Image (tube, rainbow, N blue to C red):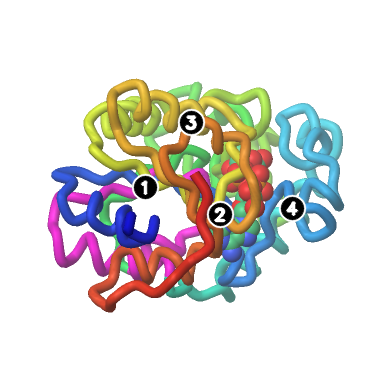
Amino acid sequence: MPPEPIDEVRGWLAEAPHVAVLTGAGMSAESGIATFRDALTGLWARFDPQQLASPEGFAADPALVWDWYASRRAGVIAAEPNAGHRALADFERRHPGRLHVITQNVDDLHQRAGSEKVIRLHGDILEDRWFDACHRHARGANVCDPGWAEPGSPPACAECGNRVRPGVVWFGEALPVAALEAAEQLARRCAVMLVVGTSGAVHPAAGLAYTARRAGAKVVIVNPQPSELDALALRRLQGTAATLLRRLLAGEPPGPVSATG
Ligand code: OAD
């Protein structure tokens, strides 16, 4: 009898010299953080990304955008890592250097669970940065820290009026170069890539799964729903991140799981 897909993937993980894990919003869904594209509950089903997640939207209505991110920040601070985040961190601890997380998420739940090798493709919602280069800095001031801005919605430089914005990547903006390069390297060298909780709709992040597949990695999807990356995956495990990562990565013997592919 052929092995259950989950046993098969566990075998691949046990043998893989290197595992890359590409995570998306579904990774944090069981921590109570909304995804983007799930029907009804996804943020982009309820809010306009052009208005709230683009430089143009911020320029048009900074207070609206700032306040929306302030409420999302509060949600992230109140959330706790789930069993999926912990399973990844535990595996990394038990097998130093063998597993790296590449995340599209702007929360810090991987880090709080204990993952150390986390590459953040889309920034950090808990960080602030200037919208433009602050004029004080341009004039040669030694330090021009967003933390010095006058409080407000958003905080602004008392001298030049420049505004503080959240440190996330918005639509139309480039990803941090070093993070993308590091992620591409990992995608090229991993033997297994787990693609967890992402719709695969946003590039270049989703392209990392293609890179891994082209380089010969076994690509495995963990998602309760179909995704845009299903066709390239060698196995698709249907279920949630917290349930499946625990079963894939922890020591306990796996049970049956619904799977396709
Ligand atoms: P999406 O909202 O596009 O996709 C979330 C995925 O998670 C879907 O495929 C769901 O089926 C799946 N999902 C839901 N609950 C899950 C669970 N409990 N366990 C596992 N999977 C689950 O989110 P992303 O793919 O992350 O960009 O979106 C990519 C980017 O688009 C985000 O990083 C964000 C957004 O605009 C920026 O912030 C720059």
Distance between the alpha carbons at the discs numbered 4 and 1: 21 Å
Q: Which residues are magenta?
A: 84-113
Residue bearing mark 3: 232
In magenta stretch: residue 104: yes
Q: Residue at x 39, y 29 (%)?
A: 180
Closest to the observer: 156 or 99?
99
Between residue 132 and residue 70, name the one nearer to us.
70
In this rendering, would 171 be left or right of 13? right
Q: Is mark 3 within 8 Å of ligand 1?
A: no
Lower sequence index among marks 3 and 4: 4
- Closer to the camera: disc 3 or disc 4? 3
Q: Secondary structure at mark 2?
A: loop
Q: Nearer the viewer, mark 1 or mark 2?
A: 2
Which mark's residue is nearer the viewer, 4 or 2?
Answer: 2
Alpha carbon distance from label 2 to label 3: 14 Å
Residue type at numbered disc 4: Asp
According to the picture, the residue beneath numbered tag 2 turns out to be: 223
Badge 2: residue crowd in 10 Å (few <14, some 14–19, many ≥20)? many
> As drawn, is 203 to the left or to the right of 183?
right
Instruction: Categorize mark 3 by other alpha carbons within 10 Å: few (<14), some (14-19), many (20+).
Output: some
Measured from the top left, where is residue 98 in percent x and y? 17, 50
SS class of the residue under badge 3? helix
- Between 228 and 188, the one lying in front of the other is 228
Residue 242 seen in the current view:
yes
Ranked by sequence position, the earlier of labels 4 and 1 is 1
Q: Residue furthest front?
A: 1
Q: Which sits earlier in the primary sequence, circle 2 or circle 3? A: 2
User: For the point 29% across and 42% down, which residue is it?
Assistant: 192
What secondary structure is marked by label 1? strand
- Residue named by callout 4: 38
Q: Are marks 2 and 3 in contact (CB under 8 Å)?
A: no
The residue labelled by disc 1 is 21
